[in-house]
Amino acid sequence: MAEKLYQEEALSKSYDSVLMRRLLHYARPHWRSILFCIFLLALLSACGLTMPYLVKLAIDQVIAPATQGQVPRSELLSRLGWLTGLYGLLIALNFALGYWQTLLLQQTGQRIIYRLRSDLFAHLQRLSLSYFDAHPVGRLVTRVTNDIETLNEMYTSVLVNLFRDCFSIVGLMGMLFYLNRTLAWIALGMLPVVFANVWIFRGLARENFRDMRTRVAGINAFIAENLSGLRTIQIFHREARQIASFTTANRAYFDSLWWHLQLFGLFRPSLDLLASFALALVLWRGGILSAAGAIELGTLYAFTSYVRQLFNPINELAEKFNLLQAAMASSERIFQLLDTEPEIRDREGAIAPPSLVGGIAFDRVWFAYEGDNWVLKNVSFQVEPGQTIAFVGHTGAGKSSILSLIARFYDVQRGVVRLDGQDVRDLTQASLRRGIGFVLQDVFLFAGDVRGNIRLDHPEISPEAVEEAARAVGADAFIRDLPGGYEAQLTERGSTLSTGQRQLIAFARALAFDPAILVLDEATANVDSETEAVIQEALRRLTAGRTTLIVAHRLSTIQRADRILVLHRGEIRETGTHAELIAREGLYHKLWRLQAEQQEGLALQP
């Protein structure tokens, strides 16, 4: 498996004003809650600034005079009680405000993330199939989970709490200069060194964040594919090789994460070291001033408390820059996905007919999935409503591509595909696909009950209609034998059912929606002969009056088709009924004879 499939393009945003405006757009509906959170943070900062000052007052105006006998005992107790009570009140108020602010902020952040995650998932549902052909599922899961959660940290920790840090820094610097200008300049003299440290860390951490996001997306993509293909891995005994490949990817992510931890392990202690050095200088100079009587002991205590507090929001700002870098990397990829326009879109003025009749026409159609690698070349044919048409040919002849073009999963490069005389590009995708029922070789069943898998929670399909569709395709008997019957819970992809049972449920699903066009793409390839006989009998009743398109390698299943189109290398080489094509002794006759010889050989084996 190519490693490039799991790698993402390197994006390089440390900050982008356009991205930030788009992130703020999602926060705009909650601006009242955000403003109130900022107001609460201002009150919290005020409480934090007031408490050391109360201790200063207690030391300078109560405790120090008391030790010198300058304050009567009764007045001492009164002043100390008043200051202690006010200090306790501030502690309680700080707790209440902090709890209220945190709860409100987290609730607001989760509401923003809820909307963003919903928008992203809805956008994924609208993207064309060609997008998923080129992007691993695990990488897209990373967008909806890891990257969205990173943005939650940005909204809750950066967007709002940034104001608290700013309030604290401004307030603390004001208090430092208010208490003593000399000591304030000594303390602030370390800030240039702190900012230089932050700047160096910013440069080192930026690339590390991008690398981590890329590698975790690659790991998710690798895991998703390997879990989906686990049966194949075990059949071909490739577990050791896949483990080795995962170990390589996992080691690369480990190394990137270890470098991240080393950066933080050095960065935070270095800031603490600078803070301690600044505090030591303040204590040294403050002690000299206090001994000389130039500064009161309570003022020195309050000053050292404010110095310790000053470096906390500076550290927090560095952390927030760290989160901002991660958010920019995540938002860039999220909005890159949101900005991806579906290749298949409804034209302006597209019509939505109430129902389809089932007439199909291909008029000189050329189609390629990529570049000029033509899968279909100048294909033209017409299907009348109610006809059963079969497509046969070697693998890669273009059979399934024709079916995809009818449902407009892809658009043609040349020519026109018409449905009931209308260019399929002039019909809305919803109305077009509502009238087409697909049964594929690889059946996908969702985790949930059997009834829900047949009706896909469509409100207009009643429980009775579900059971009628199941009976029509011969699925009712085995469904009722399941524990719970139609309410039986299926595991992911219906892994507890046999291949034939999953196929029968897929038939029931298609028929429950009563489509005008029934598409069977190798629908009976994985069922046994007995199940196939049941399905063929049901199809003879159900295809009456319904346009049916069949792709089949097993030619015995299409003998009763009204017309068979034989494709070879993207071109229609033969067309006619089974009998006509056999009599012509062309390509179809060769395919028929080859299969007959294979079946005869199997029958002769002991």
Image: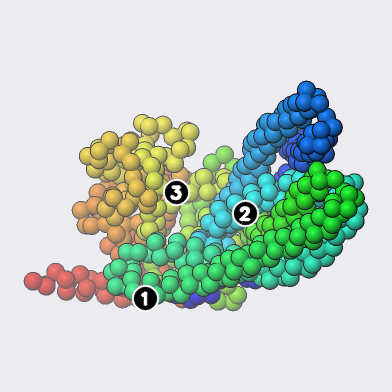
Q: Looking at the picture, which amino acid does disc 3 mark?
A: Gly
The quadrant where residue 51 appears: top right
Do tag 1 and tag 3 residues touch (Cβ < 8 Å)? Answer: no
* Label 2 vs 3, first from the N-terminus: 2
Foreground: 389 or 407?
407
Q: Looking at the picture, which amino acid does disc 1 mark?
A: Arg
Q: Residue 512: where, in percent of width, then height?
A: 40, 40
Foreground disc of the pair 1, 2: 2
Q: Between marks 1 and 3, how big is the CA–CA gap?
A: 40 Å
Element under label 2? helix
* Label 1 vs 2, first from the N-terminus: 2
The quadrant where residue 465 appears: top left
Element under label 1? helix
Q: Which residue is drawn at 75% across and 63% down?
A: 277
Q: Residue 504: where, in percent of width, then height?
A: 31, 48
Q: Residue 495: where, in percent of width, then height?
A: 32, 52
The label on residue 437 is 3
588 left or right of 84 in image: left
Pointer 1 local density, CA inside 10 Å: few below 14, some 14–19, many at least 20 = few
* Label 1 vs 3, first from the N-terminus: 1
The label on residue 241 is 1
Indicate whether 62 appears above or below 442.
above
Q: Is residue 524 visible?
A: yes
Tell me how the rendering is colored. Answer: rainbow
The label on residue 150 is 2
102 left or right of 454 in image: right
